[in-house]
Amino acid sequence: MGIKVLLAEDEEKTRELVKVSLEKEGYQVLAVSTGQEALEKYEAVHLVILDVMMPQGDGWSVCKEIRKNSKVPIIMLTAKAEEADRLTGFELGADDYITKPFSPKELIARVKAVLRRVEGDAIISDESLKFDNLEINTLTRQVICCDQLVNLTPKEFELLYCLAKRPGRVFTREQLLEWLWGFDFYGDVRTVDAHVKNLREKLSQAAPDRKYIHTVWGVGYKFEISIN
């Protein structure tokens, strides 16, 4: 069985171009044109590519719904290029964000990078981490904070684990981008900032009196438990 990709794109020309490009690389492509169709079929695939502007459910709302039940990797495909739009995609749990127009070569590179991180990530070992009121379980991919389950996206989990594995060590944004997204990721350091922001908010909901991820101005981020 090959890798199955769900492509949700309402523009026929773009949908066909992406479909053909993916199939040339050996992927099995399930192409749909509406958000509703994407929600009906995402459970049977290994990767989802979502256009933002679609009928019967835009890409953002579809991404949000998928994340309620699944950690399948999601790539957003859109003509929107504003930073706020990119951050919206990441906040909803997207793994990558491609702005139109794009080349088939760029798309394939991003698909491979995302799948590679999901299929086998050397950063995540079998060793679970336990701290004061915080447990990071690598076997179940669950984070328990103050006896509450914190619902993280796959990338948020990897980011937290990477930082918590080495408490006190400062990681630059470039290091985190390289290790967690790969050498051929086409994003920028603001991708890291967006994921840190989301991660902080989720942890603070469970533990409002504690802070786990600290900014080291001009350098990057570190994991350190402090009381607010």
Image (tube, rainbow, N blue to C red):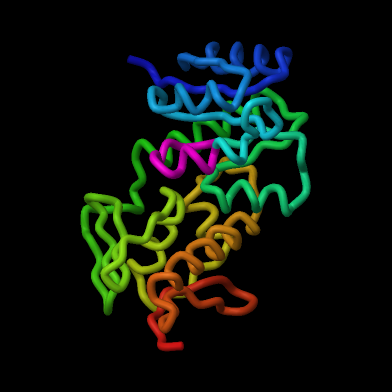
Viewer-side residue, 217 vs 94: 94
Query: Could you tell me which residue is drawn at 50 percent across and 31 percent down?
Result: 112
Above or below, comparing residue 23 to residue 43 in the picture: above
* Quadrant in the picture for residue 135: bottom left
* Residue 69 magenta: yes
* Residue 227 magenta: no
* Highlighted range, magenta: 63-74
Q: Can you give x and y, in whole percent of width and height, for residue 159 in the image?
A: 44, 59
Does residue 164 appear to the left or right of 76 in the view shown?
left
Query: Could you tell me which residue is drawn at 38 percent across and 81 percent down?
Result: 225
Placement of the N terminus among the 4 image quadrants = top left
Does residue 10 appear to the left or right of 151 in the view shown?
right
Query: Could you tell me which residue is drawn at 24 percent across and 70 percent down?
Result: 130
Q: Can you give x and y, in whole percent of width and height, for residue 63 in the image?
A: 54, 39
Query: Could you tell me which residue is drawn at 76 percent across and 40 percent down?
Result: 80
Above or below, comparing residue 195 to residue 207 in the picture: above
